[in-house]
Amino acid sequence: MVSLGIHVESDLGDILRLEYDPNRPDYSTDYGIARAVKGKLGLELGLPKHKITHSEWEVLVDSRVKSVRPFIVAMIARGLNLDEEDIRQLIGMQEDLHEGLGRKRRKLAIGLHDTRLIKPYIRYSAVDSNFKFIPLNSQRKMTVLEILRDTEQGKKYSALLEGKSAFPILVDKNGVVLSLPPIINGSATMVTTTTRELFIDVTGHDLEAMKSALAIISEVIWDMGASVESVKVVDGKTSQRTPDTTPRKATLSKDDVFAVLGIDLPVEDIKRSLLKTRFDVSIKGNRLIVTVPRYRVDILHKVDLVEEVGYGFGYENLTPDTAFPYSKGRISSETVLTESFRRLAVGLGFQEVMTFSLKSLDTQYINVGKTAFDGLRVESSKTKTYEYLRDSLTPGILEVLGDNVHEPYPQKLFEIGVCFRKDPESETGVGEETRIAGAIAADVAPFSDIKSVVDSLIEKIYGCVPSYSRITLPYLLDGRAAAVSLNRKQIGNLGEVKPSVLRTFKIKMPVSVFELSIRESI
Amino acid sequence: MISFQKLKEISKMSDSEFNAALGRAKIQGIISIEDGGIVRKGERFDDRLPEERLLETVGRGEREYESLNEDERKVLERLLKRPGMIELTETRSTLVKLTRQPTVSFEGGLGETVVTPQLIKEDAVRNITFSKIDIFAPSKAVYPGREHPINRLINEIRIVWVSMGFEEIYGAIVQPSFWVFDALFTPQDHPAREMQDSLYVLGSTSKVSDIKLLQRVRATHENGWKTGSIGWRYKWSKAESIRSVLRTHTTALSSRYLAQNPDKESRIFSIGRVFRNENLDATHLFEFTQIEGVVSEKGATARRLLGYMSQFYKGLGFDDVRFVPTYFPYTEPSFEPQVYSKELHQWIELGGSGVFRPEVVIPLGVKNNVLAWGFGLERMALLRYKLSDIRDLYSNSLKWLRGVREYP
């Protein structure tokens, strides 16, 4: 399985639990996996070949739906013999395509219907919110509005139709409702184990993705032993027959394979690998002409074919190449500077702490007597308690002190980290700055103790003495707070923390703090 | 003294009620049972439980264990079994009394107790003896200044990179979506770009100054441009690419570096915080540390990538490494490095890797093949520090920070 790009989650003897990557929606049924395994084992090689016959069915697209959910493609499956497991497989595939390729039904949604219950032609149209029909899993007629508001499916997907005054609807010649895409099917055309023929529609905004989805479905229908018939979709003056499973051609050379994988494979080996991974291949000199089936949505570039060749060769056989050219390693100047500060702080007896850059409104602002007026917030954070980008390190340190009141004192802590502020001049609107902050919590923690630390740090890093001036900060005691400047530029502050602020953080010991900018915004 | 039979008659209790009542009364010391009869103890009947009585005396001030009588000690035993009720602490005290003249000496005789600068001088002219001290006395705990265990690990990893000839790069945490996603060929409707997965900065938009690069990336997304790809085939939007986002990976720094140094053969690494819109729980952090290395080298291949990675993971102390092919949106082929943990006796996924897709490197102007690999540091930190809850790494518990072993 690993050699097919499929991960085995567990092996229960007769049953394998498999995990496939999101780029392979064609693996969303057992049939799709079996198709690949047959190739790998050499039971079937190359492109699966099937014929599509034309059906008489037509889908007429009403111009009213164009502004809501513009496109539809469809097909007919005949000669099915569905059991419970087949239906489970089809639904599993439908869900996978909805989630991945369909981006949670935004790009596309699929409907499966029993043809016996439908009178062709089908109309793809739009209705208003008072339109009534019986949705799947319901006993009574409901209006579109009720369905969107009250049903489980409606609640989950109504956002996709938000702000629309018309709603897409799929009805047959007699007005029987097939579905309200992309929300829910009608109950009238439900698929059961007695279903022998399917009408399958894909509606959405992304015609390319919709066609790919229909190709993936077609392939599974064929693998189930049934046949696929096309449907004529008439959209204004244009019409097209779907599904479209026409394969694409790509070229590949042995040099392409060597350039990516680093293995020199004969053209014949490359061909065999590709046949085993279900591509058709013909050789023209040094080049291979590869036929890529429509259901392989993961093949964007020839490197994707090279990856397939790699599977054929066996990645376990790929030997590491360690003949590296010489190069000189180096630590960044940012790290050199922050590590200098870190070493000094450790030497001064401070324990390093590391907190998150995202903080709560309370910790970062309210508890230190500041407002979040200029605060930077992230959008739709799942953890509401961590949604402000810190503008300073001191609140985080006070929080750590408050969490450790039962540990022996003195507690001397420091943190080095990035702080953020609004900066319209910067590339992203956010200015960043690396800072160091520290705190002494002890029976006595006078201003002079923390000033000694600041003096020492600055002298050892910059080789000069800073100057101090009085400042007022909402969390520092008036008259015991100072701004630190270097070459007339303010780089930080220090002082004794107000008892009221200490109580807010549940700290019972006196605390003095400092915070210095290490490096300006990048 | 009263007989059982008599008392039972008076009480009008059932057999079981009577036996239970008698038992309680005995435990509480209201009665004692002697020779088949019941004796009332004491004149005054106190309806408080002995537990209450003991707590009350303790509550008036600490009581010494020695002062408790036998009954009270039994009550204490019972109270100690109940959490949060009472605490028994042991204190040792020595009573010191000054005598007019020293009469007895500590073993080894009298002497000076403390070495002082003065005594050091005097020692030159007269022989000074110092008293023996109690070397067995417990010492006062001291706590050295230490770096955070995460940073310790970061510095170890940095040494591995530098020893392999890699140069460290550094950059901003908030990035234009362009560098985090678009330049890495991540389509604009990819789930990773949704607000459910990534954290965008409210009210901030970015500027991307290289318009030509923007156009090349747009074309690559829409139709593959000159990369040989068919592209993602959708309408690319500039507005989406300039939303300011907390970087979801440090690969954003690598893509910027490559765009600035398209012709240079380079081996670079970065270590930095990255962000995802996650709920905080035992296995997820919304903010964690990514380690990443990128190689831009003429003729670099997947085999070379495996070579670099084998050396790198060995440098980190993992002797057994294997590479399982997998899928990542911006590399092809892609591998998941797995290391064998001797502690857990199993293979552990530790990162992702691959060869950058042509759709990534060609629009950046890079002609070389580009190899990249990286992993989340916290996962390794859990192994190293034998923790199971990832939140513990950032709880900043001083107990852990002060106690964690320095030498692994």
Image: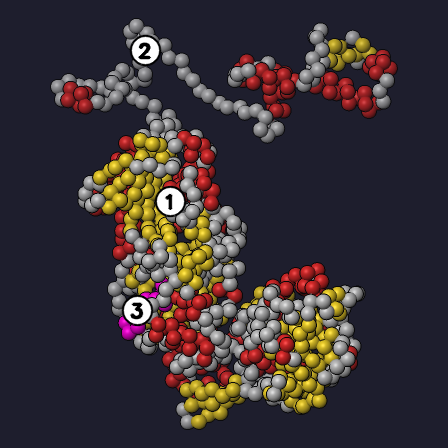
Q: Nearer the viewer, mark 3 or mark 2?
A: 3
Number of residue marks:
3
Amino acid at pointer 3: Gln
Q: Which residue is mark 2?
A: B104
Q: Is residue B276 left or right of residue A462?
A: right
Q: Which stretch did the figure color magenta?
A: B251-266
Q: Which residue is mark 1?
A: A393
Q: What residue is rendered at 43% in x and 43% in y?
A: A371
Give a yes or no on whether discs 3 and 2 share a subunit: yes
Q: Are marks 1 and 3 in contact (CB under 8 Å)?
A: no
Amino acid at pointer 2: Val
Give a yes or no on whether discs 1 and 3 share a subunit: no
**Residue A189: percent from left, percent from top:** 75, 75
Characterize the magenta stretch by its predominant secondary structure: helix
**Residue B285: percent from left, percent from top:** 48, 53
- Tell me if mark 2 has few (under 14), some (14-19) or many (20+) residues whose alpha carbon lies within 10 angstroms of its own: few
Q: Is residue A245 above or below residue A326?
A: below
- Determine if residue A39 is in view: yes
**Residue B122: percent from left, percent from top:** 15, 19
Give a yes or no on whether discs 1 and 2 share a subunit: no
Amino acid at pointer 1: Leu
Q: Is residue B317 left or right of residue A244?
A: left
Q: Nearer the viewer, residue A516 or A431?
A: A431
**Quadrant of the rendering where the N terminus of chain A is positioned:** bottom right
Which chain is indicated by disc 1? A
Q: Earlier in the sequence, mark 3 or mark 2?
A: 2
**Quadrant of the rendering where the C terminus of chain A is positioned:** bottom left
